[in-house]
């Protein structure tokens, strides 16, 4: 049982880590494009879609697709990071519980 949990933990963590790195690279690429075009926004815009639409997309309507791609990549990267921490914590707790 312990070997199976360790294997599941390693495989799941590896998969989530690779997915997270992929989305972070994608996020950095879109950030670079947005920065080159002069589009800047803060964390409040990432977390509040109405504020984003009112302040940023209204100023840069031609870049809406790129902005939304960047925001979605950031959110997905944050979700994957959170999931990675939860999986590691749960598996670590289970392994500690079943320790010999």
Image (spheres, rainbow, N blue to C red):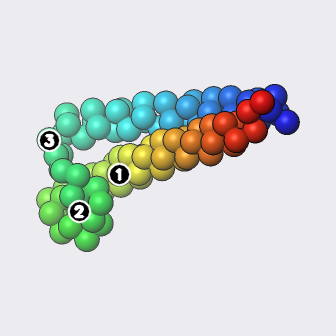
Which of the two marks, 1 or 3, is nearer to us in this view?
1
- At 48% from the left and 46% from the top, the residue drawn is 82
- At 21% from the left and 67% from the top, the residue drawn is 51
Query: Residue 7 appears in which quarter of the rendering?
Result: top right
Spot occupied by residue 88 in the image (x, y as percentages of width and height): 59, 38
Q: Residues within 10 Å of mark 1 (few under 14, many from 20)?
A: many
Q: Which residue is mark 1?
A: 71
Spot occupied by residue 79 in the image (x, y as percentages of width and height): 48, 50
Q: Secondary structure at mark 1?
A: helix
Q: Earlier in the sequence, mark 3 or mark 2?
A: 3
Mark-to-mark CA distance, 1 and 2:
10 Å
- Say which quadrant the N terminus sits in: top right
Q: Are marks 1 and 2 in contact (CB under 8 Å)?
A: yes
- At 63% from the left and 42% from the top, the residue drawn is 93
Q: Secondary structure at mark 2?
A: helix
Residue farthest to the front, as pictured:
100
Residue farthest to the right, as pictured:
1
Mark-to-mark CA distance, 1 and 3:
16 Å
Q: Earlier in the sequence, mark 1 or mark 3?
A: 3
Q: Nearer the viewer, residue 39 or 74?
A: 74
Q: Which residue is mark 2?
A: 52
- One can see residue 9 in this view: yes
- At 63% from the left and 37% from the top, the residue drawn is 92
Residue 68 sits above or below residue 29 on the image: below
Q: Earlier in the sequence, mark 1 or mark 2?
A: 2
Mark-to-mark CA distance, 3 and 2:
15 Å
- Say which quadrant the C terminus sits in: top right
Q: Nearer the viewer, residue 81 or 5?
A: 5
- One can see residue 65 in this view: no
Q: Which residue is mark 3?
A: 38
Query: Residue 24 appears in which quarter of the rendering?
Result: top left
Residue 63 sits above or below residue 85 on the image: below
């Amino acid at each position: 049982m312990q070997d199976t949990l360790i294997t599941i933990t390693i495989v799941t963590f590896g998969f989530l880590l690779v997915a997270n790195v992929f989305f972070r690279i994608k996020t950095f690429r879109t950030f670079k494009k947005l920065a080159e075009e002069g589009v800047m926004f803060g964390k409040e815009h990432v977390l509040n879609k109405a504020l984003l639409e009112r302040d940023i997309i209204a100023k840069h309507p031609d870049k809406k697709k790129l902005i939304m791609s960047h925001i979605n990549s950031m959110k997905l990267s944050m979700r994957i990071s959170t999931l990675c921490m939860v999986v590691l914590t749960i598996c670590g707790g289970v392994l500690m519980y079943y320790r010999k």
